[in-house]
């Protein structure tokens, strides 16, 4: 029989597909198995609509077999099969999908309630075989026909169709693999272990048995397609630990079954522990994405926002619009709907965990709280509303981590602000001089010890219309009438002394002023401008950040403290001694702020000298 030619555009598409469309050559096996599953589905549908009860669905199967000596790999099914016309129309024009035409022509009412779901839609997957094969043969016998046909091609040079012998209905796709090269080892697709691993990876949940020899390799019915009666939470936990190689039980199992404009099922898990590389660039986030039980993407990052990248699990939908190779998703409405719904569901589950099992949530937060904070900062606070109620901060009065809502609900009526302090440890923040006026009131202060906390509070700004206020702020909203005027008068009276202290410190501070918030401490170190001391520390910790960003430091003196009175007396009678006092007070302010003293020897010498 004369060789037929692919159409010109099909030739170009075949070359493009083999070289460019598929990222991994191993995908070909997934495509051929999906086509085999479609062929069986078509026969099931035909028997349903024609009222033929002679077919037993339990007899359907797909078989994968390899012959190392002949270098052939065969994928067989006992589905509908194809006539010579079917072979010519379906395999002679690339990107003409017989499955898609079949799906569009299905009687949806007749198929209602039946487990029929044709996977293939683009008619390209079959030709992925040419990525690994130098010759492809298709031997097929259509159900109800006595004739069998052989389609054969070695690629873009064309194909032949001729009669052949085949005992049973169905289709055999026989690949003669390319010779091995230094770059590509096609022989790996003849190895039993490799074929099994690819079937488990991509086609484990195809609904028909995939056999190698007498063994069924695939699981067929995925756990996320089963009801709670069929698969308990304990079964799901076991699946999670085996699937994601985690020794610890997850803190939450989330099942989703959605019908409507987009139908999908999801089985999600919130881990108890962060993987060792979670906060590194090496960690790969994303959910496994399936379409009708066939793995499409192992790490789909579009299904959950970055702030929830710790969630693991699977999503399976027959409604997704896939691109020609099924390896990439079109960014369409269906995907966005699924992602939006999963985002809401994960937040709800975390909120329920916080309310119903606070100790568990606290444990989860210690592992992933930093991720939630980074997520809030991303894209200029885009996820602020989503995340603000999931954050926890240590409360000075309750002596435990609380949410912003818990803090706000406990606020006395006269308290206007939500107060917080940032530093490297709770113990240091508990002794922060600037916090004394708030502590005197008996009001709670949120102690924040993560590097990003101050940025988070700046991004939030307010919570339930209450301003978030750093205790190092110049105005804590606590001053009595006339107190500000009194402080301004004291500063004016001591203007020359404050200038003397600033000059003595030789550029270490931008200004020196009197403080109205200090109580027992003689001094503290504040800032002016947008950059605080904690921000300065954060920027300094970033490697390779070039010129370091510095805060404008302000030395604040307590005019009511005996140390200030000693400074005033020394300045009036012994300015050399006053200069030593000024340096000593600055060093003390650095220690309060958790900063290192630039000249420890000078500090030690001053202490000793003033003692004797």
Image: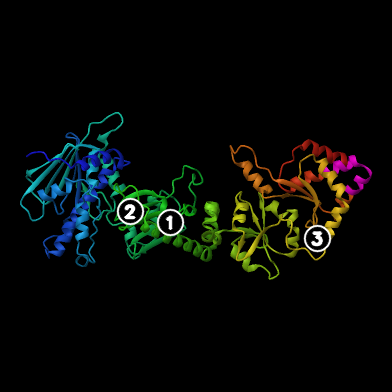
Asked which secondary structure carries label 2, the reply is strand
Report the front residue among 55 and 474: 474
| Image quarter of the N terminus | top left
Report the front residue among 161 and 70: 161
Q: CA distance from mark 1 to mark 2?
A: 16 Å
- Left or right, 482 with reference to 536: right
- Left or right, 233 with reference to 587: left
Coordinates of residue 202 in the picture (x, y in percent): 30, 48
Mark 3 vs 1, N-terminal side: 1
Residue occupied by mark 3: 484
> Is residue 561 among the parts visible in the rendering?
no
- Left or right, 37 with reference to 22: left
Please say if the residues under marks 1 and 2 sit with CB atoms less than 8 Å apart. no
Which span is picked out in magenta?
567-583
Instruction: Please rate how many residues cluster around mark 3, counting C-alpha atoms within 10 Å: few if below 14, some from 14 to 19, many from 20.
Output: few
Q: CA distance from mark 3 to mark 1?
A: 55 Å
Return the residue found at the far front. Answer: 8
Mark 2 vs 3, N-terminal side: 2
- Left or right, 539 with reference to 486: left
Q: Nearer the viewer, mark 1 or mark 2?
A: 2
Q: CA distance from mark 2 to mark 3?
A: 66 Å
Report the front residue among 483 and 422: 483
Residue occupied by mark 2: 290
Asked which secondary structure carries label 3, the reply is helix
Asked which secondary structure carries label 1, the reply is strand
Main secondary-structure element of the magenta-colored stretch: helix
Numbered mark located on residue 269 in the image: 1
Q: Residue at horizontal 81%, vertical 44%? A: 502
């Amino acid at each position: 029989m004369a060789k037929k030619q692919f159409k010109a555009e099909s030739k170009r598409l075949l070359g493009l597909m083999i070289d460019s469309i598929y990222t991994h050559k191993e995908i070909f096996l997934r495509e051929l198995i999906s086509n085999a599953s479609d062929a069986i589905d078509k026969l099931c549908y035909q028997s349903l609509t024609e009222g033929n009860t002679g077919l037993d669905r339990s007899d359907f199967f797909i078989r994968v077999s390899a012959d190392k000596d002949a270098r052939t790999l065969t994928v067989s099914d006992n589905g509908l099969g194809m006539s010579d016309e079917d072979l010519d129309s379906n395999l002679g024009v690339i990107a003409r999908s017989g499955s898609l035409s079949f799906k569009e022509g299905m009687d949806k009412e007749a198929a209602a309630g039946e487990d029929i779901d044709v996977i293939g839609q683009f008619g390209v997957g079959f030709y992925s075989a040419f990525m690994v094969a130098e010759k492809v043969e298709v031997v097929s016998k259509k159900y109800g026909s006595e004739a069998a046909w052989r389609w054969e091609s070695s690629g873009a040079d064309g194909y032949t169709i001729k009669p052949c012998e085949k005992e049973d209905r169905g289709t055999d796709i026989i690949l003669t693999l390319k010779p091995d090269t230094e770059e590509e080892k096609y022989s790996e697709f003849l190895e039993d272990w490799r074929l099994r691993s690819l079937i488990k990876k991509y086609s484990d949940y195809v609904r028909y048995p995939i056999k190698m020899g007498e063994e069924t390799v695939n699981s067929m019915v995925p756990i996320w397609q089963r009801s709670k009666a069929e698969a308990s939470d304990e079964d799901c936990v076991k699946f999670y630990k085996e699937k994601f190689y985690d020794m610890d039980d997850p803190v939450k199992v989330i099942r989703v079954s959605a019908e409507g404009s987009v139908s999908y099922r999801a089985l999600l898990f919130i881990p108890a522990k962060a993987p060792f590389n979670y906060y590194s660039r090496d960690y790969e986030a994303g959910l496994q994405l399936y379409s009708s039980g066939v793995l499409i993407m192992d790490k789909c990052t579009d299904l959950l926002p970055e702030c929830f990248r710790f969630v693991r699990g699977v999503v399976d939908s027959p409604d997704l619009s896939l691109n020609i190779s099924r390896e990439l998703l079109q960014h369409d409405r269906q995907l966005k709907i699924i992602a939006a719904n999963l985002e809401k569901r994960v937040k709800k589950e975390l909120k329920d965990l916080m309310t119903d099992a606070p100790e568990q949530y606290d444990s989860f937060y210690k592992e992933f709280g930093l991720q939630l904070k980074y997520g809030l900062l991303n894209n200029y606070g885009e996820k602020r509303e989503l995340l603000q109620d999931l954050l926890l901060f240590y409360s000075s009065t309750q002596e435990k981590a609380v949410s912003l809502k818990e803090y706000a609900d406990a606020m006395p009526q006269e308290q206007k602000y939500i107060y917080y302090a940032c530093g490297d440890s709770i113990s240091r923040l508990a002794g922060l001089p600037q916090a004394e006026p708030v502590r005197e009131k008996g009001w709670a202060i949120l102690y924040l010890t993560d590097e990003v906390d101050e940025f988070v509070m700046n991004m939030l700004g307010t919570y339930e219309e209450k301003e978030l206020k750093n205790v190092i702020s110049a105005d804590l909203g606590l001053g009595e009438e006339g107190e500000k005027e009194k402080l301004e008068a004291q500063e004016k009276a001591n203007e020359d002394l404050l200038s003397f202290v600033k000059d003595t410190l030789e550029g270490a501070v931008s200004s020196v002023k009197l403080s109205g918030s200090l109580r027992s401490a003689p001094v503290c170190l504040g800032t002016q401008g947008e950059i605080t001391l904690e921000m300065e520390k954060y920027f300094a910790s970033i490697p390779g950040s070039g010129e370091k960003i510095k805060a404008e430091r302000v030395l604040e003196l307590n005019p009511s403290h005996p140390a200030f009175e000693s400074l005033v007396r020394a300045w009036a009678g012994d300015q050399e001694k006053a200069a030593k006092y000024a340096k000593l007070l600055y060093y003390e302010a650095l220690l309060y702020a958790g900063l290192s003293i630039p000249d420890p020897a000078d500090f030690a010498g001053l202490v000793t000298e003033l003692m004797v």
